[in-house]
Amino acid sequence: MRIPRSRTRLSNTLAACAVVSALAVSTLAGAAPVAAHSGGGHHEHSTRAGDGSAGSAEAPEADPAEVAVLGREHAEEHAATRQGAQDLGTYPQATRTARLKALTESQEKTNRDYKASDFGAFKEYFDSPDFGVHVAQLPTGKVLLFSFERVETDPTKETAPTQIVGAANRGRAFLWDPQKGTGASAFKKVTPPAVTMPDSTGISRPAPIFCAGHAFLPNGMLGVFGGNLGANGGSGAKLSFVFDPWSETWAMNEDMSVGRWYPSVVTGADGRMLIMSGQSELGWGTPTPIVERFPALSDPVPYRKTDIPRFRPVDRFGADAPYKLDYPHLFSLRDGKIYGLGRSHDQQWLFDPVKETRGELAQRPGTADRSYGSAVPLPGGFRGPDSVLVLGGDRTDPNTYQLAAGKWKTKEARAFGRTQDNTLLLPTGNLLTVNGSYDIRDYGNGLYNPNADLKYRHTELRDENGDWRLGPVQRLPRGYHSNAVVLPDGRVMITGDEAQQIANDRDIKDDIDGTIEMYEPPYLHNGARPALDYVPSRPLAFDERFTVASSTTEDVKRAVLLSPTTATHSVNTSQRHVELRIKRQGNGELDLQAPPTAEAAPPGWYMLFLLNEEGVPSVAKWISLEPNGARS
Ligand SMILES: [Cu+2]
C-alpha cells in the first residue's frame, strides 16, 4: 500500500542533497529496451513484441556510505539523480550545443518568409525545469507541467524510467507562472506526493504519474489517474490524485481498481469524470476494458475551491470500453453523450453517462490504426460542439475527418500527415496545429535518432472555411510527449518531447532539462485588442444573463468561452469553444448570456474572451459555471 508523505519532509530531503552530491556514482543495472516506451500506431504490435519478457531494469544502486548517513530511501534518490551524468560521453554537450544552434538559425531563416499578421510568430524560447510530458492550463493562470526524472541523458536511448522498478521510477511536477516571466523564479516545484508502489522494492518516491490521464473537475482541480508501475513494457499504476490549483498542492485519493498506463479521462455534463483504457498493472498489451468514474456517484461533485476530494474512491461505470489501443479521444458533446473515438477505425463508441451504456458509432474512414494524433471538438455556436474533427496520427494520411450527426466526412487535408501533433482551438474558433513527427521515438531518420525531418516543425493554421495553410516553424522538432496550451493572454505555450529537449539541452549538467517556446497567433499582430475590464467573480448559472465591463464596448463583435485545457500524448479531451450571445452592449458594459445547459458547456472554469471585428481577442478573464450559479 502507498504511504503518503508530507511535502515538507520531501522538501527537507531534497535540500539536504547538496551536502553529499560529490559521492561516488553508482551504476544502472541494465537499460530499457529500445521500444519500451512506444505504445501507438500500427507498428506497435511488431515493435513491442517480446516486451513483456524484457523484465525490469533495477533502480540505480545506492552508495553504502550514503545509505549509512542518509538512509536507503534518500540514498536511492541520490543514485537516481546522479546516474544521468555518467552518460555524458556518449552524447557530448558540444553535440547538443551545435544542434540547438543549427535549429535556432534555421528557424530564424525559415520564419523570415512568414508575416506575423498572417501567420503569427514565434517569440520566447526559454528553459523549463520539466519536460512537460503532461500540461494543464490552470484557472489561476499558471500552467502545471509534470513528467518523470530522466534516467538517461543520451537521447538515442530510452530516457524515461518506463522499465524501471523502484526509486528511479518517479514523477515530478512544476508550476510555471507566466506573470513572472520566463526565468527560474517563474517556476515552482510542486512535487507529487510520495508513495510506496506495490512493487518488489517497497521504496517510497514521488508518485510516478507520468503517462497518466487527466481532466478538470468543476472546481478547477485537475484529476490525474494512472501512471507507471515500472517494467513489462509499460504497466499501469492505480494512482488517483487531484491537483488543487488554489492551494497548489496535491491530494491523494483511493486507488482505482485497475492499473492504467495511457488512459484517457473526460469530464461530462454532470461534472464527473469517466476514466477509460490504459494498460493494466500486468503490463503492455493488457489494456483494461473497465470504465471508472470520479467522483463516485455516492460523492458530491466538487464545485467550490474548498471542496478538495481526498481519499475518495472511484466507482465502476455500468458499461465497459474494450479499446484495443490506449489513449482514445473522449469528448462530451452538446447531446450530453461521451464520444469515445478509438485509435482503431472500428472502435468508435457512444457512451450514455446517465444510462451507463455503450453504443456503436460509424466506423472512421480508413482502416489503419492511428498513432497518437489530434482530435478537436469543432465550435458549434452557443449550444456547444456537436462534431469532432480527427486529424493526425497517420503520417501517410494528410486528410482530416469530421464526425457529425453520426456520419464521417473527409474534410480539407493538411499539407502532410503527421503523428504526435497537437491541434488547439483558438479563441477565434480557428485551429492551430503544432508539434508532430514521423512516428513514436522516430523523427524520420530511424528509431531513437534525434535528427528530425524538419518539416514537422511547421505550424499549420485552419481558417473559418476549414482550409489549412502552413505557418512558421517552432525551434525544436517536438514529437512523442509534446504538448501545447492556449494561455489566457491568447499566446500558445509549446513544450514537451523529452528526447528532443535532452538532445538540444543548453547545459545537460544542470537540472533544467526542459524548454518552452511561445507562439503568438496572427490575431496578436492585427492591431489593438478589445478590453475586458471586469467579469463577475461569483459562479454563473446556465442560461444566466450577466454583465461584463469593457472600455471598448463598441468594438466588441463576439464573446466566447474557451476551456482551459490539459493534454498529453496528443489527447486533449477538455478543449471546448462556446459562443456567448451578446444581449446588450453600450456604456462600457455588455450583457452576455451564459451557455444554456451543462451539456453545452460542462460545469467548470472557462476563459472569457471578447473579440473585435478582425478577430482580435481581449486578454481573457476567468468565469465559472455551476448548475445553480451563486445560489448553490
Ligand atoms: Cu508516454
Image (tube, grey):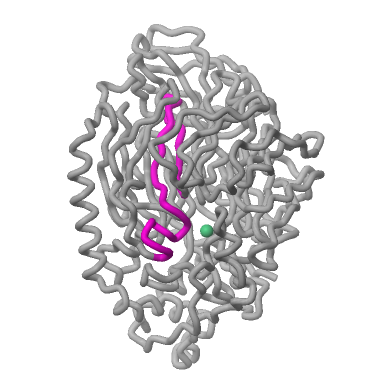
Instruction: Identify the residue at image location x=47%, y=57%.
Output: 440
* Magenta region, residue range: 420-448
Residue 120 place in picture, x, y as percent? 29, 33
Residue 305 place in picture, x, y as percent? 58, 41
Instruction: Identify the residue at image location x=41%, y=75%.
Output: 81
The reply to whether the magenta stretch includes residue 411 is no
Instruction: Decide which of 334, 207 is in the foreground and name it.
Output: 334
Residue 508 place in picture, x, y as percent? 30, 69
Q: Quadrant of the C terminus?
A: top right
Instruction: Identify the residue at image location x=38%, y=17%.
Output: 550
User: Is 618 above or below relative to 237?
Assistant: above
Instruction: Decide which of 523, 51 is in the foreground and name it.
Output: 51
From this viewpoint, is residue 58 visible?
A: yes
User: Is 374 above or below relative to 388?
Assistant: below
The reply to whether the magenta stretch includes residue 431 is yes
In the image, taking residue 108 as reference, residue 465 lies left or right, namely right
Quarter of the view holding residue 596 = top right
